[in-house]
Image: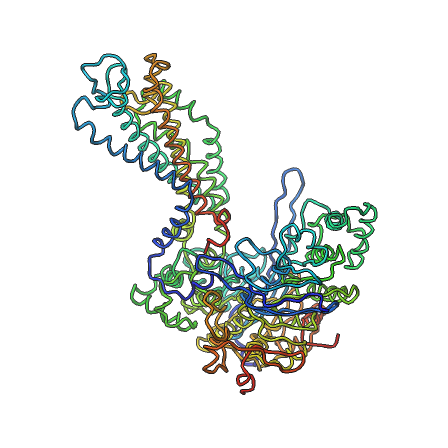
Amino acid sequence: MKNTKNRPENKNHYVERFTKGWAIYIKNPMGKAGLIILLIFMLMAIASFFVPLLGPVYDPMTGADPNITYSTGPSFQHWLGTDFIGRDLFVQLLEGAKVAFIVGLSCAFISVVLGTAIGMISGYAGGIIDTLLMRVADIFMVLPSLVILLILASLWELSIWVIIFIIAIMRWPSVSRIIRSQTLSLKSRPFIEASRVAGASNFRIIFKHIMPNVLPLAFLYMTFRVTSAILVEAALSFLGFGDPGQVSWGMMLQWVWSSGHMFQAPYWLLPPGICISLLTLSFYMLGRAMDEVLDPRLRKEGEGE
Amino acid sequence: MALLRVENLSVGYKSKHGLIHAVNNISFSIEKGRSLGFVGESGCGKTTLGMTLMGLLPENASILQGDIFFNDDNLAGFNDEKWRTFRGKEISMIFQAAMNALNPVIRVDEQIAEVIAIHNPQMPRTQVFDQVKKIFDLVEIPEDRLRDFPHQYSGGMKQRAIIAMALACAPKLIIADEPTTALDVIVQDQILKEIKKIQTALNTSLIFISHDIAVVADVCRDICVMYGGQIVEKGNREEVFQSPRHPYTRSLLESFLTLDSNGDIKVPEIRESPDLITITGGCSFAASCKKKCEKCENRNPGWVNLSSTHQALCFEEVIHKD
Amino acid sequence: MTEEQNNQTPIIELNGVTKEYSSKKNFLSKGEASIIALNNISLAIQKKEIFGLVGQSGSGKTTIGRILVKLEEPTKGIIKLNGKPTNNLKGRLLKNYRSKVQMIFQDPYQSLNPHLSIAETIIEPLVVNRIGNTATRREKVIETLEIVGLSPGQEFFHRYPHQLSGGQRQRVAVARAIILDPEFIVADEPTSMMDATIAIQLFQLLLDIRKKFKMTFLFITHNLAAAKYLCDRIAVINNGVIVETGIADKVIKNPQNAYTKKLILAQPGFNFKN
């Protein structure tokens, strides 16, 4: 709106953009709900670092209660009950939250950094480089990631970090497609041409002019990548191909299944299932609300600048 | 009786910085068969005015006060339902972006026929298409181009088709909002001639909105100059353009480049669009006015009669100061 | 033009410049469709003049501007800067060329990066050409801001494009174009998005800059009246061909070409006879 033009502002541009975006974000009920759920899971993940300090019984992997040798329901001692060798389920659930965050965020981070870099280079360079990179992206895009992971996991025992890396490698192409098309439309914008006329190098144009314009979009895609990474890891673990040395929600489900408690222990089956759904849902809601911040067309009239 | 009479009309937009007074207490009227031009620069409220008269205000805008009398109806109180039957039939509009106003996947003649059919549901189909042919004849689109799709038309042809669509139901009033802004000069010239010819031939009333004073002077007999949501000067075109009295009209004319102007251009010191949120007492043009005096800044100017048809929204002393 | 200037080497010279855009059709249809945007254009622009290029949309006038600032290369023909051919420059030579030839773009809402402050935008040519240090650059930016009428310069230094009006933005674009002290500036319809009262103020600024810094301008426009006001000489271009060149006043008073005549006749004026 025109009336802002004479208002002196010395606030940092990025701080200002953030506060403006935040104001739109927080008005969205979906964004608010997503953020609250996410905060709860974050608390759980943080708690998982402290609970094992209470005693060896509370180690999610090795801390079996010596008094219990079979799966028990919720009690004062074990809030959610125990598994078939007497490990505390609540402690495992907290540990699972931590793992889900590590898997989701690092996977998303790697794939988005890779996807953004490749997308920007591909879109800006054009020609043969663009064609080559996008064909590679196409190949990765059509690969069935879960099947490949299953094959690899059945051949070798994969640690959680290897799994994270493989999921990330499988997931960059869709990010780079989006970033590439955004870069293509930015490339022909006059402010990029003005910078070229000023004598700026390609490197400077990509990192100084194009990157700040695609970063919000990359960040948005990161939230969606988190969701898919958590789901893939959970599926893999449930099928029994996860990192056997690492408790995760998928692994908990696998233990329910393999120990034959599927229909006997709802206190064991339901919490990890619900957690997986809620956490992925919260990231999804986060993404949708951010989408609204970034895409002014979705915003209601009159709220925008 | 006037065909359209607007009285004390104010229109505001809600924004997060406050209410924007886009149109501020405007009154005017137009007789049958006359042409009235609104001229002003961006942010003066001319487009909002046009949208208000068509009932096409966006959701965050509303009429704050005033009446719009069209014959015996007060359009200011119309709901969506009433507008649907009224719009296109009694008042129609020629839009600025011709390329976007036509549906790319429907043949041009069918788009015009649809407009006629909506407002005349009983009319048989053959008669509808006869009507379409007549209108195309009027806007000089050759008959063999009738069945074309919009993309097969040139820019000028598309604008003609838009005019044809506006004429489809023989409206009593046509509102044209910058109908030639996107066109080249040569095509613009043809379209303006077309509009003038049709307006006289059909004896409809025309409200023509533009930022280009030469275009408005070419098409319209009566002129309203707008600034900051208000009409600041009105009169017939000879009065307004040959003896402008409001300081804004003067700087508008003085800074307008024509092929005849040689060196007599004065560079105005106009700040861009005035603040329409905080309405202070006082003239909205005072900040850029070369002739302003003390009271311009704290008292609202009133209408000064210069002839029976010519008025300026200013102070007597300021107008006569030289 | 005075005779003295006619004897000088022109600052910019186009010799038989042709630009074709070929659009490769898909494999089902044979051959390539090519569009001729410019057809054998020859022009000479003298030092310190404002040369107007007048044409309607699609006439090729913007393509000439883009070729001159090396955003595009011609298919055929030679471009000379101060008598030296400049086709297909690369690397340091291209950078050097660009420090001498700058451009003001049409739409000030599109030609400024929304994420860069005014200072960052104007300073860019200095940074990429490694001129001065932080302190001298800052001084130069403030000085340039004041030249283009955005004073006090300190006040605009940290603002962002969205906090400025259209006219102010275009002044920022002018500041970016003149900060390297170029010899030649291409102004591509710099006022077509502006109101007449704001446009005339920008024209005044361009005239002031020419006077102060002895720069040469190519002014690209669709508006004959603006070209007459601003330019010493004009060329009228239609469908990629220059149809008439001459001293602005003379061309408009006494057009020789049929298209120029048509263009002048179509110009709306204040005649109240109808």
User: In the visual, does A7 lie left or right of B239?
Assistant: left
Q: Residue A111 in the image: state x and y as whole percent.
A: 38, 36
Quadrant hosting residue C222: bottom right
For the N terminus of chain B, which image quadrant? bottom right
User: In the visual, does A70 lie left or right of B104?
Assistant: left
Q: Residue B260 in the image: state x and y as whole percent.
A: 64, 79
Quadrant hosting residue A272: top left
Q: Nearer the viewer, residue C122 or B53?
A: B53
Relative to C168, is A270 above or below?
above
Colouring scheme, one of rainbow, by chain, secondary structure, one colour: rainbow
Q: Nearer the viewer, residue B181 or A91?
A: A91
Task: Look at 35% across and 28% down and name the residue there.
Answer: A275
Q: Residue B132 in the image: state x and y as whole percent.
A: 79, 52
Q: Nearer the viewer, residue C274 or A285?
A: A285
* Residue C57 in sight in this render: yes
Relative to B8, is C91 above or below?
above
Q: Residue B235 in the image: state x and y as whole percent.
A: 65, 76
